[in-house]
Image (cartoon, coloured by chain):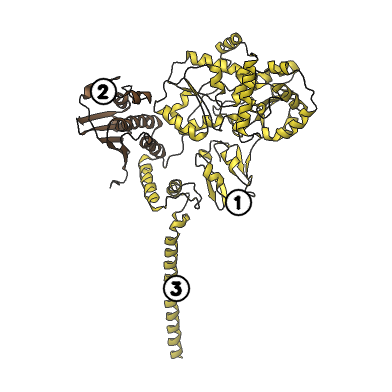
Chain colours: A yellow, B brown
């Protein structure tokens, strides 16, 4: 009966309830019940922090296995530019794409080029947009979900231009089916993903439209085989490989990459959920009205920091940065044709299908008067708690525990600091029971004495 | 702190003048309470903005102040009492663009002269009174039920 799909699953065999995930979860969506982690579906925004935190690898991202490829007549891999960031300046996108083809895909698509097109499209949108500012990038699905859950007032500020991977998949299906004489559904498009949330944005897009991507394969799953596959590829011309890189799109793998291409006077690039919360609070208060555009990624440093990547995120961030600097130095500007993009833009080619709707959390009660009463109860319960957020009750903070108690999802005695009271109550009950049984036995013995007398 | 009435929630937030590192905390807490209770999101946004502007006025100009949130099923009320310089000419202060903010405050993104007018714009009812040299009090109301609106 889950209304929301999520990109992670907890392996209860492996989970031993060490609470690491519960403590890192930025939306307090995890509880420990009967010694195992449980996810509160409505609160989870699929950021993947818990996957990295779990010492037992008990939190499993739901990406697709390689075997899914056999379901299609023709398969195309669409690697996130974050894949390019996993390799140094020596292994350029061209080689990576050839390596992917050796792994069993019929083709590999360079997403950086589409990213470049979308950069231009965003520029167009920013130019004609007249509503409240700043506009917010929709490229990180976790951020989009955060806005739906916690900042519903900002929904209209989320850019309605579709994300590059979706546009690319749509285009691939269309052109390949024509080219090969196949049906669109016979062409499998697979995103090579740096994080699990992309999986969910494919299975259940936030805008409720339909995704053109058929599956997502984790970068960490493909990394090893890809390295081996690339060993046998002959080294081509370095200059030529460089000339194939779209400078506008390559930066999309890292925070600041989009802002860099838009050349705006006032834009911000934010990464890491706790930082995003601060910035979004400020937007909601109207403090950032002079900022035109904000790109925000839940992972530190952007997609290169995704939980399904391999390379250290600062190193991969730097690799992309150096690659951009090299391109700038060599004056290589392989870009989409802006006139072509403008033409497509005016035909609404880039706009997302469907509308983003808020996804507010369930209130304490549907009835306002009851909700107010429960909120007061929560405050009262909180006062009884030690406020040290030890987590032993299974909730991340005393305040979260108080809410669980009010909602009837936990008992006050689950708090060990309230255990002495529980013991006192129990011993009281026990002594009453003992007294009862003692008096009962004395009654019994009296009766038997009386009976004896009769005899 | 606690009121006797069962379906009335009342909470106080103390605000210290010049304490910029904690500025915004009261209005964030208020927003969270409203979301938990399930107040309509458009009202929550308007009330959070009003609370934030009121809070920032204390941080920037007053010595200290208390912001009180009061909710019943009929209405949501924000009351602010501060100890500070007060406002000499309320009519002037209510005009958009009027501000006595220093350059430093403007550098931080405040002092556009939007504070009080912004509170009034977002509220369903707004009252202000002030005694120069003593302090200012604001009474900001949002209607939650249809009957209250009339």
Give me the disc on residue B94.
2
Are the two marked residues, 1 and 2, in contact with CB atoms closer than 8 angstroms? no
The reply to whether residue A351 is in sight is no
Name the residue carrying label 1: A16
Q: Nearer the viewer, residue A87 or B11?
A: A87
Give me the disc on residue A412.
none
Question: Which residue lies at the image location 58% right of the left edge and 15% below the top edge?
Answer: A349
Question: Which residue lies at the image location 78% right of the left edge and 29% below the top edge?
Answer: A231
> What chain does mark 2 sit on?
B
* Dot 1 crowding, Cα within 10 Å, few <14, some 14–19, many 20+: some
A316 to the left or right of A96: left
> What chain does mark 3 sit on?
A
Q: Nearer the viewer, residue A179 or A394?
A: A394
Question: Which residue lies at the image location 46% right of the left edge and 47% below the top edge?
Answer: A397
Question: Which residue lies at the image location 64% right of the left edge and 37% below the top edge?
Answer: A62
Q: Secondary structure at mark 3?
A: helix
Q: Secondary structure at mark 2?
A: loop
A155 to the left or right of B76: right
Name the residue carrying label 3: A434
């Amino acid at each position: 009966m889950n209304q929301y799909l999520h990109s992670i699953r907890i392996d209860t065999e492996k989970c031993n309830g060490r609470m690491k995930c519960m403590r890192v979860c930025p939306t307090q969506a995890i509880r420990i019940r009967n010694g195992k982690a449980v996810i509160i579906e409505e609160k989870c925004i699929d950021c993947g922090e818990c996957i990295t935190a779990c010492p037992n690898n008990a939190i499993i991202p739901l990406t697709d296995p390689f075997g899914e490829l056999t379901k299609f007549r023709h398969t195309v891999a669409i690697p996130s530019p974050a894949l390019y960031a996993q390799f140094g300046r020596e292994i350029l996108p061209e080689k990576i794409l050839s390596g992917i083809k050796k792994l069993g895909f019929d083709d590999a698509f360079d997403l950086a080029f589409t990213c470049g097109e979308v950069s231009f499209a965003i520029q167009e949108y920013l130019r004609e947009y007249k509503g409240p500012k700043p506009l917010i990038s929709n490229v990180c699905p976790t951020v989009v979900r955060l806005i739906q859950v916690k900042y519903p007032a900002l929904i209209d500020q989320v850019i309605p231009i579709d994300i590059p991977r979706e546009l690319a998949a749509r285009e691939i299906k269309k052109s390949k089916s024509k080219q090969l004489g196949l049906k669109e559904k016979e062409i499998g498009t697979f995103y090579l993903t740096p994080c699990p949330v992309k999986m969910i944005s494919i299975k259940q897009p936030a805008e409720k439209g339909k995704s053109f991507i058929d599956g997502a394969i984790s970068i960490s799953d493909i990394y090893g085989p890809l390295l081996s596959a690339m060993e046998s590829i002959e080294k081509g011309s370095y200059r030529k490989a460089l000339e194939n890189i779209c400078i506008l799109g390559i930066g999309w793998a890292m925070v600041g990459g989009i802002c860099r291409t838009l050349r705006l006077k006032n834009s911000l690039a934010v990464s890491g959920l706790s930082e995003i919360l601060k910035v979004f609070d400020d937007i909601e208060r109207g403090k950032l009205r002079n900022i035109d555009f904000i790109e925000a990624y839940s992972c530190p440093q952007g997609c290169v920091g995704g939980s399904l990547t391999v390379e250290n995120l600062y190193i991969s961030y730097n690799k992309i940065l150096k690659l951009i600097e090299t391109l700038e130095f060599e004056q290589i500007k392989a870009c989409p044709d802006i006139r072509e993009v403008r033409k497509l833009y005016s035909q609404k080619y880039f706009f997302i299908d469907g509308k983003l709707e808020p996804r507010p959390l369930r209130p304490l009660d549907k009835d306002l008067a009851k909700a107010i009463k429960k909120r007061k109860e929560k405050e009262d319960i909180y006062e009884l708690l030690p406020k040290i957020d030890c987590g032993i009750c299974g909730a991340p903070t005393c305040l979260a525990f108080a809410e669980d108690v009010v909602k009837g999802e936990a008992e006050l005695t689950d708090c060990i600091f309230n255990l002495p009271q529980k013991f006192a109550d129990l011993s009281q009950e026990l002594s009453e029971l003992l007294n009862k049984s003692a008096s009962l036995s004395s009654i019994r013995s009296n009766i038997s004495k009386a009976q004896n007398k009769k005899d | 702190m606690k009121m006797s009435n069962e379906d009335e929630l009342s909470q106080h937030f103390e605000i210290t003048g010049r304490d910029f590192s904690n500025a915004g905390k009261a209005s964030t807490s208020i927003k969270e309470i409203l979301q938990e209770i399930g107040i309509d999101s458009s009202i929550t946004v308007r009330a959070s903005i009003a609370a934030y502007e009121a809070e920032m006025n204390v941080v920037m100009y007053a010595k200290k102040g208390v912001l009180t949130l009061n909710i019943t099923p009929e209405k949501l009320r924000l009351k602010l009492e501060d100890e500070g310089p007060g406002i000499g000419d309320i009519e002037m202060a209510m005009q958009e663009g009027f501000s006595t903010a220093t350059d430093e405050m403007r550098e931080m993104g405040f002092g556009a002269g939007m504070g009080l007018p912004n509170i009034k714009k977002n509220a369903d009812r707004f009252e202000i009174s002030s005694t120069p040299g003593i302090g200012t009090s604001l009474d900001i109301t949002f209607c939650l039920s249809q009957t209250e609106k009339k």
